[in-house]
Image (cartoon, rainbow, N blue to C red):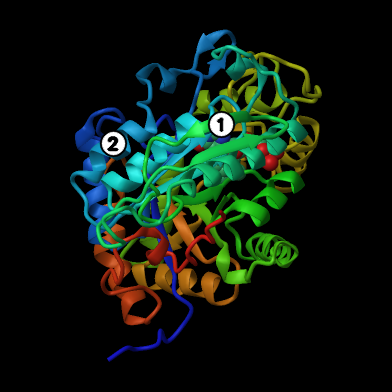
């Protein structure tokens, strides 16, 4: 018997917080962000919870603060596709998503690595295409930070299109017939603005046709790129109101590319804090925030916006009157969120309105707690977000590495299943099938 889902289905993914200030490092349960056992723990938990995929971010240069390597970065971060290849061996169904930059790589090489992961994992690979190409990161690469924003997205779009050409370049059927055959390579040629390449691709067509493509930029160019080329958007818009606006905006761009609203899934990155009662969850949330943002961290967070040394300021005192320096190089290697002067003004307004100190303002403005409550309340909110088109699902960022997802899988997933909003078993073998995405149309 086939049953129709009672309600719009929720998609779930697990974000491994690598180099990060989400993890409460002071918690005795916190473990390494490098050891394979940590990756394996989170991935196995996600698979036990029937999640769509496991997600790894990427940082291509260690961040700096006042000319010194950022504390958290000295622990380092392993390369995503390597980690995911190892995880492919200890999981069966879980999708494996790697963030990989389109500015500093080459299509042939990256398409080859992604196709290899897709083969090794039986159709579970995904690529989060990012473009972050500040000159600081670019210094680690041969050509430096050579692309401005508009060019980064034309390169990214051409990069993805070229990768798709390479994945499509093998014939569907080999000499031994369609079943079990890998097909045969055919010559490819791509002559474009950013890439001028020709030859034969070294890996047969991936089991998913094309690995799933995720996009994470937020500018109009980034959204347009998502509408034209992505299967999933990873977004920061994780509140009901902002989520609905973002959802409508991005889904509204799809028709121009001949795509249906369901062809692109919108998944905000969110955190959660659970408790047996609403009050207990709130208490835990406050405690977690206190541990994530020490008074010292608050000054550092402020310096990241202002771009000037603020070490003389009292974390328990008011925000600085001076304006940020938009051209500052005090902090390097972070994705800048908005115009620093506008952010500073916003923070000052909040602090004035609520009478908050520097420390309290940073706790409020950099808050990473999206869902706080009992398992039932969190399940209800997740369902509401998805039912009312504020999201198609969530990329969960736990505040403990690697055990932070355990409680969610044990206590919230069963409630989502009871509501008929989340799968009770994996139906297909590939990530594309978990996400309900169409087969990529084969060109050529
Ligand atoms: C939710 C989210 C997650 C991102 N994760 C990464 C990442 O892991 N690595 C990276 O280099 N850039 C990351 N980025 C940066 C984007 O790919 C993009 O380069 C940046 O946001 C600038 O593009 P935009 O102007 O379109 O926002 C992320 C962006 C967003 C919004």
Task: Point out residue 77 in the picture as x, y percentages from the top left corner.
Answer: 38, 25
Residue 83 lies, with reference to residue 399, above or below; the image says above
Q: What percent of the width, then of the height, locates residue 372? A: 44, 60
Ligand 1 within 8 angstroms of badge 1 C-beta: no
Query: Which residue lies under the disc numbered 2?
Result: 27
| Helix, strand or loop under label 2 | loop
Where does the C terminus fall, quadrant-wise? bottom right
- The local crowd at label 2, few if under 14, some if 14 to 19, many if 20 or more residues have their Cα within 10 Å, is few
Residue shown at 37% from the left, 58% from the top = 431
Q: Nearer the viewer, residue 439 or 82?
A: 439
Indicate the position of residue 37 as horizontal and vertical percent values: 19, 36
Observer-nearest of 327 and 431: 431
Q: Quadrant of residue 165?
A: top right
Residue 430 vs 269, above or below: the answer is below
Q: Residue at x 66, y 31 (%)?
A: 336
Residue 73 as seen in the image, left or right of residue 337: left
Per the image, the residue denoted by label 1 is 198
Residue 26, labelled with which disc? none
């Amino acid at each position: 018997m086939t049953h129709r889902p009672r309600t719009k289905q929720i998609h779930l993914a697990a974000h491994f917080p690598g180099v990060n200030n989400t993890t409460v490092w002071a918690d005795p349960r916190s473990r390494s962000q490098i050891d394979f056992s940590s990756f394996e723990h989170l991935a196995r938990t996600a698979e036990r919870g029937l999640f769509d995929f496991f997600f790894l971010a990427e940082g291509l240069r260690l961040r700096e603060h006042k000319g010194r390597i950022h504390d958290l970065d000295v622990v380092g971060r392993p390369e995503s596709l390597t980690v995911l290849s190892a995880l492919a061996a200890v999981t069966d169904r879980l999708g494996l998503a790697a963030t990989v930059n389109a500015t500093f790589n080459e299509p042939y090489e990256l398409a080859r690595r992604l196709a290899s992961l897709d083969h090794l994992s039986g159709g579970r690979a995904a690529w989060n295409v990012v473009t972050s190409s500040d000159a600081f990161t670019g210094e680690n690469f041969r050509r430096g930070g050579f692309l401005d924003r508009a060019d980064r997205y034309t390169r990214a779009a051409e990069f993805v299109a070229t990768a798709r050409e390479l994945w499509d370049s093998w014939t569907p059927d080999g000499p031994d017939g369609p079943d079990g055959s890998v097909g045969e390579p055919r010559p490819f040629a791509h002559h474009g603005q950013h890439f001028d390449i020709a030859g034969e691709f070294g890996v047969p067509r991936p089991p998913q046709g094309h690995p799933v493509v995720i996009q994470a930029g937020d500018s109009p160019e980034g959204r347009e790129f998502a509408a034209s080329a992505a299967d999933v958007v990873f977004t920061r818009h994780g509140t009901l109101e902002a989520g609905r606006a973002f959802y409508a905006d991005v889904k509204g761009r799809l028709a121009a590319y001949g795509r249906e609203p369901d062809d692109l899934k919108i998944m905000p990155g969110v955190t959660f804090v659970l408790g047996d009662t609403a009050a207990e969850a709130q208490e835990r949330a406050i405690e977690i925030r206190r541990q994530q943002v020490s008074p010292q961290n608050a000054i550092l967070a402020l310096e990241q916006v202002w771009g000037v040394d603020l070490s003389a300021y009292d974390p328990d005192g008011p925000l600085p009157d001076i304006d940020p320096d938009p051209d500052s190089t005090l902090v390097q290697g972070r994705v800048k969120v908005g115009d620093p002067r506008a952010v500073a003004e916003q923070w000052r307004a909040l602090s004035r309105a609520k009478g908050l100190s520097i420390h309290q303002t940073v706790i409020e403005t950099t808050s990473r707690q999206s869902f706080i409550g009992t398992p039932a309340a969190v399940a209800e909110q997740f369902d509401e977000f998805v039912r009312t088109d504020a999201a198609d699902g969530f990329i969960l960022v736990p505040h403990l590495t690697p055990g932070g997802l355990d409680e969610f899988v044990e206590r919230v997933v069963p409630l989502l299943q009871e509501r008929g909003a989340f799968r009770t078993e994996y139906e297909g073998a590939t990530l594309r099938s978990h996400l309900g995405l169409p087969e990529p149309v084969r060109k050529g």
